[in-house]
């Protein structure tokens, strides 16, 4: 059990890294058109569709920057940093619980990705295709945030493992 207790923060850090890598996977899918998928970085930082017509290129905004969708990645980075500090023996019980809380709160935010997505209405001349609320209802969550949320929950469990091993096993 001492090995598990010692390496639990590293396991939490690896799971946190997997959650961060999920920013490159599918985050949002259009429920009306399954071929229209968006990666996590597009949903977080914004995305415009470039359409080339003749010699000119027009950009149609799809997503705007979403701070709410950036927060879980920041929280996971904080959890990773604290887990590494705990592995190196530089932390205390408070940092331990803060790391667990960061991973757990990040998981909640990952599962709420579709709520924080700021979708811009598409414009074709003066005709608005759909309003922002209709577009938001047309989106469903992809596998990236789901896997990231699960990894964050597992990272919180791994980060809390030394406490439970100390209390209930030893």
Image (cartoon, helix red, strand yellow):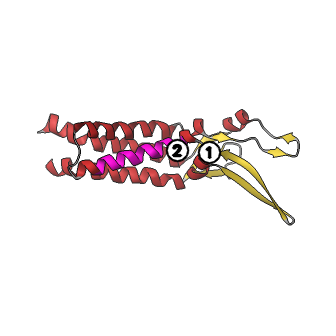
Residue sticking out furthest to the bottom: 55
Marks 1/2: CA–CA distance: 9 Å
Q: Earlier in the sequence, mark 1 or mark 2?
A: 1
| Mark 1 lies on residue | 65
Is 43 included in the stretch rendered in magenta? no
Report if residue 10 is visible in the image.
Answer: yes
| Residue 82 horizontal/vertical position (percent) | 31, 46
Left or right, 60 with reference to 39:
right
Contact, mark 1 vs mark 2 (Cβ under 8 Å): yes
Per the image, label 2 sits on a secondary structure element best described as helix
Is 71 included in the stretch rendered in magenta? yes
| Residue 124 horizontal/vertical position (percent) | 85, 46
Query: In this rendering, is residue 133 above or below 74?
Result: above
The quadrant in which the C terminus is found is top left
Where is residue 102, by image quadrant?
top left
| Mark 2 lies on residue | 70
**Residue ID at (35%, 49%):** 80
How many marks can you see?
Answer: 2
Query: Which residue occupies the foreground of this view, 126 or 81?
Result: 81
**Residue ID at (34%, 45%):** 155
Q: What range is drawn magenta here?
A: 69-84
Per the picture, the main secondary structure of the magenta-coloured stretch is helix
């Amino acid at each position: 059990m001492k090995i598990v207790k010692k390496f639990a923060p590293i396991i939490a850090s690896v799971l946190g890294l997997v959650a961060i890598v999920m920013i490159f996977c599918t985050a949002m899918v259009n429920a009306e058109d399954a071929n229209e998928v968006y990666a996590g970085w597009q949903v977080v930082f914004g995305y415009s569709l470039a359409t080339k017509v003749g010699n000119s290129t027009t950009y149609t905004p799809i997503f705007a920057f979403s701070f709410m969708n950036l927060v879980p990645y920041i929280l996971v980075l904080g959890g990773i940093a604290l887990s590494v500090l705990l592995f190196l023996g530089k932390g205390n019980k408070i940092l331990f619980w803060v790391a667990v809380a960061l991973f757990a709160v990040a998981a909640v935010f990952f599962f709420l990705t579709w709520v924080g997505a700021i979708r811009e209405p598409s414009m074709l001349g003066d005709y608005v295709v759909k309003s922002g609320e209709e577009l938001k209802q047309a989106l469903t969550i992809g596998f990236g945030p789901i896997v990231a949320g699960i990894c964050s929950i597992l990272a919180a469990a791994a980060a809390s493992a030394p406490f439970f091993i100390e209390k209930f096993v030893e």
